[in-house]
Amino acid sequence: MEPLLTIQEASKLTRLSEKTLYTFAERGKVPHIKLGRRTFFSEAKLEEWVNENTVAPKGPEGDSQ
């Protein structure tokens, strides 16, 4: 099993504030692990989540190419 990231480590990795990550986790928008009252994150799952939420660039006239 890979080591789990704390909220501070996940915040540095994603460049999102800790508050935003907690909010996303509460709303089920970001993959996370709850162990008791503590929230942890998987680095691999966070990277996958970022890739899934990447927006493709648009062409010069605003059309997708």
Image: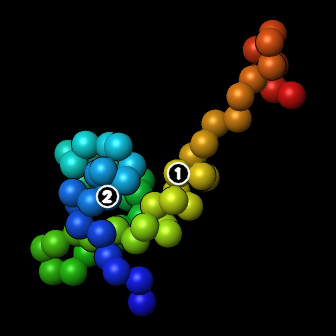
Please state which of residues 41 and 24 is positioned toward the viewer in this rendering: 41
Evaluate if marks 2 and 1 touch, with contact meaning CB atoms under 8 Å apart.
Answer: no
Left or right: where does residue 54 sit relative to residue 59? Answer: left
Image quarter where the N terminus lies is: bottom left
Q: Which mark is residue 50?
A: 1
Residue 23 seen in the current view: no
At label 1, which amino acid type do we have?
Val
Residue 21, percent across and down?
A: 29, 51
How packed mark 2 is, by other alpha carbons closer than 10 Å (few <14, some 14-19, many 20 or more), is: many
At label 2, which amino acid type do we have?
Ala
Residue lying furthest left: 37
Residue lying furthest bottom: 1
Task: Answer with the quarter of the image where residue 42 lies.
Answer: bottom left
Give the residue at mark 2: 10
Placement of 27 over or under 32, stated as above or below: above
Q: Residue at x 22, y 49 (%)?
A: 18
Residue 50, percent across and down?
A: 52, 51
Task: Answer with the quarter of the image where residue 63 lies.
Answer: top right
Please state which of residues 51 and 25 is positioned toward the viewer in this rendering: 51
Q: Residue at x 76, y 14 (%)?
A: 62
Q: Residue at x 30, y 50 (%)?
A: 12
